[in-house]
Amino acid sequence: MEEKKHDCEQHKSKRYLAFYIIGLFSVALVIILLSYLTQLRADRELANMNTALAQKDTTVQGVQEKVAALQDKVEEQSEQIKKLESQLTGVRTELELEAGEDLTAVLQQRMDERDAYSQLLAFEQAVAHEDHEAAQECIDYLEHTYGAGRLDGTADNAVFSDAMAERYLELKNQLA
């Protein structure tokens, strides 16, 4: 009977051992499966990070290319500015201007002087041919456009110099 009991206990112990081994293998398989799933997730995250990094790298390269292009444009424009400044200096030298004088104002003054001289010439010819109507039109144009102060030489921005202002006044008096 003891043998039977012993056999029965041995059989039970083998059974417990089998369940224990099966349980250990099951736990090991679950751990391996969890490890595998965790590794897959980590690989996916790593791939996403690599993709994001590659995109950022591409973006940085694009920005660097744009910066280089902008620097080239800045250099080109700086060269153009230097050329234009040298041309402006040449024009100022040619027109005998000071550095602080306004180029536009000086050019406008010179254009006004040229126009006034051409009108004075037409006025002088009209007086010489005794064409009072044309002479009066010239006076009206000159006085309306430039004003008496600029024509008689008393204004700061006079269109006639001393001799020309005197000639204008002389012709105007002849007509009157």
Image (cartoon, rainbow, N blue to C red):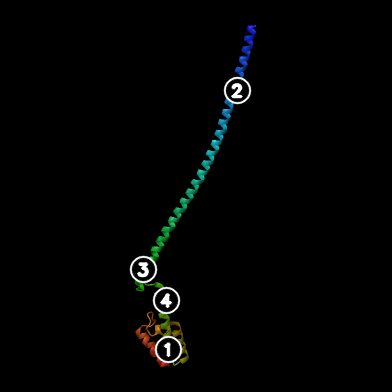
Say the numbered circle drawn on residue 89.
Answer: 3
The tag earlier along the polypeptide, 3 or 1, is: 3
Measured in 3D between alpha carbons, the distance from the residue under mark 4 to the one under mark 2, in whole angstroms, is 104 Å
| Amino acid beneath label 1 | Gln
The percent coordinates of residue 121 (x first, y second) are 41, 86
Q: Tell me the residue that label 4 is attached to.
A: 108
Q: Tell me the residue that label 2 is attached to.
A: 23
| Amino acid beneath label 2 | Gly
Q: Tell me the residue that label 1 is attached to.
A: 125
Viewed as shown, does residue 18 lie left or right of 93? right
Measured in 3D between alpha carbons, the distance from the residue under mark 4 to the one under mark 3, in whole angstroms, is 18 Å
Say the numbered circle drawn on residue 91.
Answer: none
Viewed as shown, does residue 159 lie left or right of 133? left
The answer to the question of whether label 4 and label 3 lie on touching residues, with beta carbons closer than 8 A, is: no
Determine the residue positioned at 63% across, 14% down: 12
Determine the residue positioned at 54% across, 39% down: 45
Q: Nearer the viewer, residue 25 or 48?
A: 25
